[in-house]
Amino acid sequence: MKKRLRRLLSWPYRTLRATVLLAVVWLGFLRSRRQITFSWPTPATALGPKLVLFMHFDRHGRVREALFDYMRDLAGTGRDIVFVTNSGKLAPEALERLREICAVVLVRKNIGYDFGAWRDALEALDLPRADTREIILANDSVFGPIKPLVGILERFDYEQADVWGLTDSWQSLYHLQSFFLAFGPRALGSRAWRKFWDGVRPVPLKAYIVREYEVGITQAMLKGGLRCAALWPYHRLLEMITPDELQTLAAAEDTDLGRVDPTHVTRKIHMLRIRDGLAQRVPMNPTAELWRQLLLTGFPFLKRELLRDNPTRVEDLYEWQEVVRGVGGDPAPILRDLQLMMKDATP
């Protein structure tokens, strides 16, 4: 009887929620997809065969110092950088510095999240063009690179796969994580590519964007017969979490320090968490739970959300600076950014 009453009382709430969600989605379909308010240069410059569409947002129109280094690194691989910001404005000094690195700078209203920005840029620049051989979608959701990108991007082999990501995930549905996606000639010329971008709308609902676009783009490419692959596949990362590592941690517990040191305990808890996910076949976010394994195998980034918010409460994150130094990186630029971001927490 109580269960029936609860279901009955929850019906108006569920109905209202569904109505609001439907209205929000429809708003995205009614809005204009063209939100660019400023473009440099005018007329648009010629673009090379390999491009990076770099998505950015900062409500003050500033660009983090580390992002200039990131884009210089990308430009150093022989790719033209198209910088597109959802900030609605750019600080004058930021624009001046971007002109030194980027082939194109686009400013648009903060409508449609990353995929709205990428779609707008593709249309505004009439991409892909006849000579376009690669388009990379990247954004500012990461810290780094902590090592040069040139050797990493050389690993994109479009004979082996048509779409490349750095990492993949099995959460929700299988997908390449959208902070860095590379599309080769076969993908760019495909019906699946055209159909996907024709369907992107500036829906003001993050959950919809994640499901339909962040996850949806990989699914759309797969359903279109294209091959998708990651440089750091999820299953390879899991293979690094071996019983031998647990044995080492267990042996350390026989020492006085191992029994009482909280950092040792948290390291063991996190490893058990990963092993439990493996045993239960529960997919984890590789850029969060497997951050250590990624860095140890040459991955060049740490997610901003991970260090700033740690939303999934990764237990062993306190060691990130030590691991970055151990793989030859410098945590100082990341620390400078965190000083402006973190509240009531330490890195």
Image (cartoon, rainbow, N blue to C red):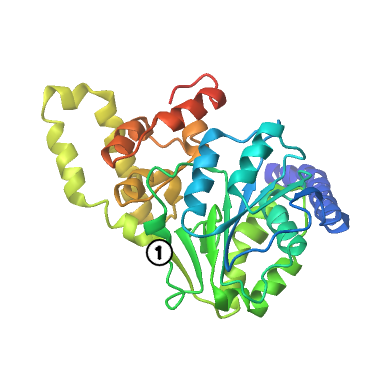
| Label 1 environment density (alpha carbons within 10 Å; few <14, some 14–19, many ≥20) | few
Asked where in the image residue 32 lies, by quadrant, the reply is bottom right
Residue 241 in percent (x, y) is at: 27, 51
**Does residue 12 lie above or below 61 as drawn?**
below
Asked where in the image residue 85 lies, by quadrant, the reply is top right
Residue appearing at x 66%, y 70% in the figure = 128
Residue 23 in percent (x, y) is at: 85, 51
**Does residue 44 lie above or below 145 as drawn?**
below
Q: Quadrant of the C terminus?
A: top left
Q: Is residue 91 visible?
A: no
As rendered, which of 173 and 56 lies closer to the eye? 56
Task: Label 1: state its secondary structure.
Answer: loop
- Amino acid type of the residue that numbered disc 1 sits on in the rendered structure: Glu
Extreme-right residue of the structure: 30
> Horizontally, is 63 left or right of 175 in the view?
right
Q: Which residue is mark 1?
A: 154
